Image (cartoon, rainbow, N blue to C red):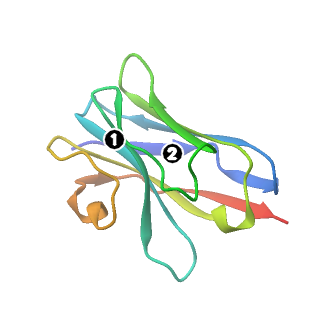
Amino acid sequence: QVHLEESGGGSVVAGGSLTLSCTASRRTLCMAWFRQAPGKGREGVASVYSGSIVSRAPKSMDDRFTAYQDSSRFALYLEMSGLKSEDSGMYYCAAKDSHPCSAAFGAAQEYTWWGQGTQVTVSS
């Protein structure tokens, strides 16, 4: 069992920045960020396998979002800049010990462990 805990969410004005953190109770092979806006499905943001980025944020987030792990690989971060109102939602950290390590559409169901999420609200 792996416990994941996210932090760093909050309310910002459009154009602002936030850095989300996810701490795992143990090292896992694959960690990822997903997000979910009200009334929408869970959307992949980025995944990291053994410390190396595997799948990057979709085009809508590209160049604004950066995911990375620390050297211990117990923590996963998501740096977000140039935030837009459409970036608002609950951001979840997920992890698993298997392949593939992806945040593509439909990949959410393949993850074993999930955090409770951290809310990001961007006001225009």
The residue identified by callout 2 is 6
Residue visible at 80% across and 47% down in the picture: 16
The quadrant in which residue 65 appears is top right
91 displayed left or right of 104:
right
Residue 43 in the image: state x and y as whole percent. Answer: 44, 65
The quadrant in which residue 41 appears is bottom left
Residue 5 in the image: state x and y as whole percent. Answer: 46, 44
Q: Quadrant of the C terminus?
A: bottom right
Q: Quadrant of the N terminus?
A: top left
Secondary structure at numbered mark 1: strand
Residue visible at 74% across and 48% down in the picture: 82
Q: Is residue 77 visible?
A: no
Q: Find residue 71 and name its label.
A: none
Few, some or many residues within 10 Å of mark 2 (<14, 14–19, 20+): many
Query: What's under tag 2, amino acid-wise?
Result: Glu
Query: Hey, which residue is sitting farthest bottom in the picture?
Result: 39
Q: Is residue 22 visible?
A: yes
Query: Hey, which residue is sitting farthest left in the picture?
Result: 98
